[in-house]
Image (spheres, rainbow, N blue to C red):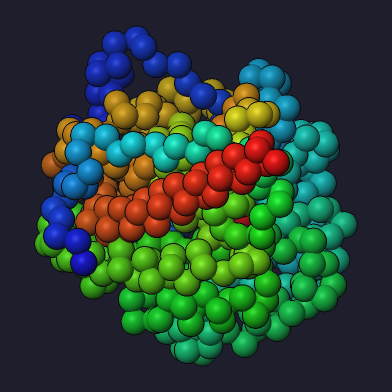
Amino acid sequence: MPVSDTIAEWPAGVLAHLRGTWHPSPFRQFVIKIAGRCNLSCDYCYMYEMADDSWRRQPDRMSPETMRVTARRIAEHARAHNLADVQVILHGGEPLLPGPGYVGTIAKALRSAVGAQIDLRVQTNGTFLTNPMIDVLAREEIRVGVSLDGGPSANDVHRRYANGRGSYAAVAASLRRIRERAPHLFAGVLCTIDLRNDPVEAFESIQEFMPPSIDFLLPHGNWAAPPPGLAPGGRGAPYGEWLTKLFDHWYAISPRKSQIRMFDEIIQLMLGGQSRVETVGLTPVGLIVVNTDGDLEQVDALRSAFNGAAETGLNVHANAFDDALNHESIIARQIGTAGLSITCRNCALHQVCGGGMYAHRYKPGTGFLNPSVYCNDLTHLIRHIYRRVSGDVARLLEKTRAAGGSEGSS
Amino acid sequence: MDDLSAGDSGLGQKMPIIDFSGISLNQLAKLDDSVLINSLNRILGDVENPDDVVFAGFNASI
């Protein structure tokens, strides 16, 4: 379905709702799709297996000219908004597929145009982390996030090569190499939840590689195309229960092991802080995606909603990043509560869940102005975390006061 | 599980922020490392040295 067919859906007309009260936040995170293809055929992939097939029109890799223009646009945006630093995430497809020479050239082009204040990262499926690749990543100071769904059986249910062979063995070997050769580069693991996998086993299997952080990702879906095992509008919370079991296991570990970003951010929000990730909270989204041909896109998980959902109609060859700041879909994700449905605004938890991940709110007819299809699950999880953390903070306060009282009287 | 429907948190109109006033970074430094202590350290650090800019970033492991 082309974008124009859904024009009446939210966020169309968002500016009229704001009545001049909105001020854009600049982009600080640039996701650059340097490769348009992948060597794996994961069955849940939003790029290649869901509603959007625009990847078929994309080149295999970003051209040197598009890379140069992208780097220049980032530098221009940083200067225009006085940004002290920006983060660039190399993404794909599989961003390491074009090889270490290409990755090194891309990194040099970015650093040369943008300067020292660039924080370079790569999100990879982990199958190309050979020693020469790790050496290039180390030389160019590119930190690495790897996708892994747990142990061999959990991972290989979905994360397979086109011939059906699982990817676990290759990824595990890569992670051992990077732990041995350049452990400081290893930023974390991204794990997509499968309800059939035990959450504690998945967490502990990933712990073998000692990632500083694990991001557990809810499978992409929405009200029209529900995630596996979820009945939209029903009263169950299967993902909430799965995550609650994981939370209880993780929360009790002392000394701490890996961070679990979703849980850490939820706790920060409950303490009155701000989230730094788009999946929870109402912090303005500061990221933009540059596709392999230079097209500017919104976060590409939106591809799971409908064909063309991530498109902006802009391209680095013709447009500055500032042009994307005026795009209605970007605006809708920078306006906090004003970008939420009435149901969400009337809910006590909306400051914490933030309405859930934007892609998960889609429903034909109302667009993205709905609660998340995971609303019950998020509610179940957030209430559980709130009870646990608020109780522990209260006990800690009592202890602190008691200790302070005895210190004062002695 | 909780008996809930969409938008019904069971916590009234607004979930209260957890009150940690009275806890200091010095006190936390004496306690064993845990998720809770790390979270309190982070929020107290943000209070004492607030970032001028916070943005919501990409949902990846990096």
The residue at the point 80 percent across, 40 percent down is A111
| Horizontal arrangement in the rendering, residue A159 relative to residue A144 (left or right) | left
Between A398 and A135, which is closer to the camera in this rendering? A398
The residue at the point 22 percent across, 43 percent down is B11
The residue at the point 38 percent across, 26 percent down is A335
| Horizontal arrangement in the rendering, residue A396 relative to residue A226 (left or right) | right
Residue A202 locus on image (x, y percent)? 49, 78
Residue A104 locus on image (x, y percent)? 80, 56
Quadrant in which residue A119 is drawn: top right
Between A234 and A331, which is closer to the camera in this rendering? A234
Q: Is residue A157 visible?
A: yes
Residue A311 locus on image (x, y percent)? 40, 41
**Rendered-image quadrant of the C terminus of chain A:** top right
Query: With respect to residue A245, does B47 lie above or below?
Result: above
The residue at the point 45 percent across, 37 percent down is B19
Which residue occupies the extreme top position in the image?
A20
Quadrant in which residue A368 is drawn: top left
| Horizontal arrangement in the rendering, residue A146 relative to residue A178 (left or right) | left
Residue A380 locus on image (x, y percent)? 27, 58
Which residue occupies the extreme front position in the image?
A410
Q: Is residue A127 visible?
A: no
Query: With respect to residue A227, does A25 lie above or below?
Result: above
